[in-house]
Image (cartoon, rainbow, N blue to C red):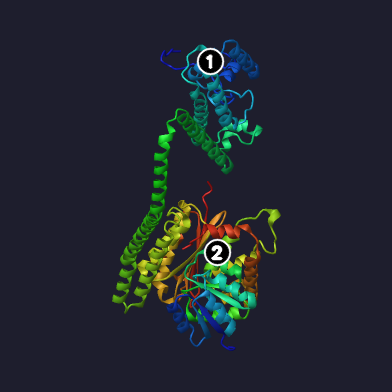
Amino acid sequence: MSDPASIVIVDDHALFRSGVRSEVEGLVEVVGEAGSVEEAVRVIGATRPDVVLLDVHMPGGGGVEVIRGVGAVDPGQRFLALSVSDAAEDVIAVVRAGARGYVTKSISGEELAAAIERVRDGDAVFSPRLAGFVLDAFAGTVPEAEVDPDLDQLTMREREVLRMIARGYMYKEVAQRLDISPRTVEAHVSAVLRKLQLSNRHELTRWAAERRLVD
Amino acid sequence: MAETGASPAPRSQPPDRRERPLRRDPAAGIVGGVLAGIAAQLGWDVRLVRVLFLVGVVVTGGLLLAAYAVGWLLIPAAQSGGRAAPAPVPGRRRGWQLGLGVGLLTTSGLLVFRELGLWWSDAVVWPLVLAVAGATLLWAQSRRADATAAAGPVAPRAERAPSDQSAPAAALTPASRLRDLYRGGFGVALVVGAALLFLSQVDALGAARDAAFTAIVAIFALALILAPFIWRLGRSLAAERAERVRSQERAEMAAHLHDSVLQTLTLMQMRADDPREVAALARRQQRELRAWLAAGGEAGEDRFAAALRAAAEEVEDAYRITVDVVAVGDADLDEPAAALVAATREALTNAAKFAAEAGPVSVYAEVGPEQIEAFVRDRGPGFDPDRLPEDRRGVRESIVGRMQRHGGTATIVSVPGSGTEVVLSIARDAR
């Protein structure tokens, strides 16, 4: 394995930060922690980590504000959203703001480390839940005139990949099942992430608002 | 057809005949709408009737004015919606012109009385005219406010609205409220002025003025002294109420946390040696707390996704495992959907029994336009479905059999060493 990724953990609960720290100990290098939006922007600017582990819910605007604040200085900074809330609206908002993935806080240490590696390498990380959100948000048909096929619709293959992820398969297993290479799976997921971030599909917002709390 | 004598049916004639009872038309009239009503009754132009009326007043030496007043009192006003308005009339006219009209009416009435020799004193003329005009202004305004409050912008008013933007329907706009205030103030000033004028004319004011002045100064001084107290009292009352609401909320929250979270934490300490039990307790508490925070945002139990989640939670609680549910789309919980939920529950139970140690079980359900699919996947040791013992009724009956009975399918894919996936699919009820 290459050098361990350097990360900054941003969460307003100190207890949770130390929990994550001990989970990923030895797998990645924790170079900083922050408990508020301002502190996060300062720490990230000072330490320049490979990946920022970002809590979706924080006082003072939450993860979205951190991404905005850092993005103004360093647009290349990579973020991985981490949350217990699972409110679709917030998750979609933080991903659209620029996070390259979303995992739930129940994730295991190794899985989290793997997700961090993947985000560092510029790939997208979709948990089963995020895959479900995206499938739901992109479900249904868009009036022909409004469709930008590049952004507003998922291809058959992307849909297939997302469904496998939603069913709980790892990228590697998805590749096996669909008989494609793991790189292709990652390319599909990255394409979906791009669509999620750039699409103007009005359903996205409406759908997310309707589903304030999914679980 | 039985004729019921008591039935109040004044409009039993055919409506296209113009034989309707005489009605005033306050909306079209200047003062009381008597002339407008007469004009409508006769089918004449209202202006003609008015000219004739004025001529009549002059000729009869004012007696016709008394007749007008009697007519105003006795003829009921028309229901505004019952007929088409003959001429659109600006609503603004109602206040000012009514006041002016009644004032003039009073003047001429007084002149008539004077002519007839029924007279008290000239001092009464101006005060009386001003007072009547002011009172009319106030009266008209309060009635208008009543009507606006009661009726709102109803259709008959809207019919007349296009001809004038200040129709009554617009009475609640800020500009018109200001106008009302202005008019009301003017009316009050008229009445008060009339009273003062009268008093000064009868020389009663001289003595009263000193007393009134003293009283006003005293009240003003008192207001200055008390104002801060009253202000502060109002403020502190509001603050106290807000504080009470807050403390009630806090008490409610404390009670809930005590009943749920603290209890669970105590339980978890007692079971600290059983990690699975602790995890299950924590998970159940997490779910409860989340539901409580969402407070009613939850979908009803008669929907497919909610039922699926409920089933997963039951298995979680019963077998102390973790189930991740991802549902895409939703549907009513009709018979096929319920069968799918039941089969899913059975598959989950199986996974809980045979793959509990291997991490969370994933459930993915997708409601499509024609079918509902569910995937239950565990990461357990797996088995060979073809060599399933006959006595494993759970899989055979509850999953495969149930799906087949409802016209669905169940496929079990199990690779020894990398887990099992149960794929359930059922057609949606085509109703």
Residues behind callouts 2 and 1 on a single chain: no
Using the image as rendered, state which of residue A152 and residue B153 is in the foreground: B153
Judged from the image, the secondary structure of the residue bearing numbered disc 2 is helix
Q: In which quarter of the image is residue B176?
A: top right
- Residue B336 in view (yes/no): yes
Using the image as rendered, state which of residue B275 and residue B113 is in the foreground: B113
Instruction: Judge from the rendering whether residue B213 lies leftward or rightward of residue A190; answer left or right.
Output: left
Q: What residue type is labelled 1?
A: Val
Q: Mark 2 points at which residue?
A: A133
Give the percent coordinates (x, y) of residue B364.
51, 65
Of all chains, the one bearing label 1 is B
Give the percent coordinates (x, y) of residue B231.
41, 54
- Residue B401 in view (yes/no): no
Q: How crowded is mark 2: few (under 14 residues within 10 Å), some or many (20 or more)?
A: many
Judged from the image, the secondary structure of the residue bearing numbered disc 1 is helix
| Residue at 39 percent of width and 57 percent of height | B232
Instruction: Judge from the rendering whether residue A41 lies leftward or rightward of residue B235; answer left or right.
Output: right
Give the percent coordinates (x, y) of residue A128.
53, 69
Q: Give the distance between the C-alpha atoms of the residues marked 2 and 1, in whole angstroms.
A: 87 Å
Q: Mark 1 points at which residue?
A: B112
Q: Quadrant of residue B166?
A: top right
Using the image as rendered, state which of residue B425 and residue B407 is in the foreground: B425
- Judged by depth in the image, the label closer to the viewer, 2 or 1, is 1
Q: How many labels does the image show?
A: 2
